[in-house]
Image (cartoon, rainbow, N blue to C red):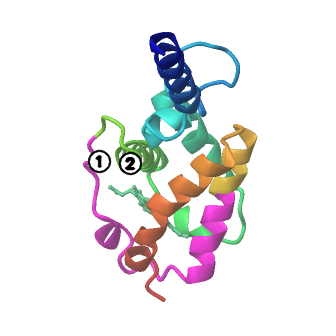
Amino acid sequence: MRIQMTLMAVLASLSLAACHHKDGGAGTGTTTPPAGDTKSLFDRLGGQDAINAVVDDFVGNVAADARINAFFANADIPHLKQGLKDQICAASGGPCVYKGKDMKTAHAGMGVKSSDFDALVEDLKKSLDKFKVGPKEQSDLLGALGPMKGDIVTK
Ligand code: HEM
């Protein structure tokens, strides 16, 4: 009877452990923490170096995008890139503080249309694909930037 109880306790704890490792590399038998649901989006994107690489490429796409590049004809590109890097870092739970203008002030009087915003998001998505950012991270990032649309689009 005692042996049976001990065996049941062992089996129960094993099945709990199996459950626990659901997200952490199936069958490895390691104690890797579950990936995906505990790490910040900042970490899942690959940290600041990965964000910097995406932003540099993305701003290159925007500069080459005839649909919207006229908006940026007089822009201070290094300043814009730094703002985007800090902003994406902060919005994804990273350790940065975005110190630039708020989105309403930064885009006031530009007459950005909804289609311009969508074109810019397309240019961002191209870079996310190029750097092999996964679908969940892409949708989480776009979900963090999407709410800014109301402050940026004025036309
Ligand atoms: C989620 C979308 C967007 C984000 C996160 C974003 C972010 C930013 C940031 C951080 C700045 C710099 C603010 C500062 O000066 O401190 C900026 C400036 C600017 N943005 Fe956006 N923006 C977005 C969409 C757009 C769109 C759709 C357009 C036009 C098609 C646009 C055009 C500009 C321009 C022209 C500047 C001024 C650059 C300069 O004069 O230095 N932005 N934006």
Is 115 left, or right, of 72 in this rendering?
right
Task: State which tag comes first along the sequence, 2 or 1.
Answer: 2
Give neighbour class at mark 2: few <14, some 14-19, many 20+ (Cα, 10 Å). some
Disc 1 within 8 angstroms of ligand 1 (CB) = yes
Amino acid carrying mark 1 in the image: Tyr
For mark 2, give the secondary structure.
Answer: helix
Q: Residue 74 or 54: which is nearer the viewer?
A: 54
Is 36 left, or right, of 90 in this rendering?
right
Is 4 left, or right, of 92 in this rendering?
right
Marks 2 and 1, how far apart at CA: 7 Å
* Image mark for residue 98: 1
* Image mark for residue 38: none
Observer able to see residue 63: no
**Residue 48 on image: x %, y %:** 46, 31
Amino acid carrying mark 2 in the image: Gly
User: Which residues are drawn in magenta?
Assistant: 97-123
Task: Give the residue displayed 50% in from the left and 10% down from the top.
Answer: 3
Task: Give the residue displayed 41% in from the left and 46% down from the top.
Answer: 92
Q: Is residue 96 above or below residue 137?
A: above
- Cβ atoms at labels 2 and 1 below 8 Å apart: yes
Give neighbour class at mark 1: few <14, some 14-19, many 20+ (Cα, 10 Å). some
Residue receiving disc 2? 83
**Residue 32 on image: x %, y %:** 53, 19
Task: Give the residue displayed 47% in from the left and 19% down from the top.
Answer: 5
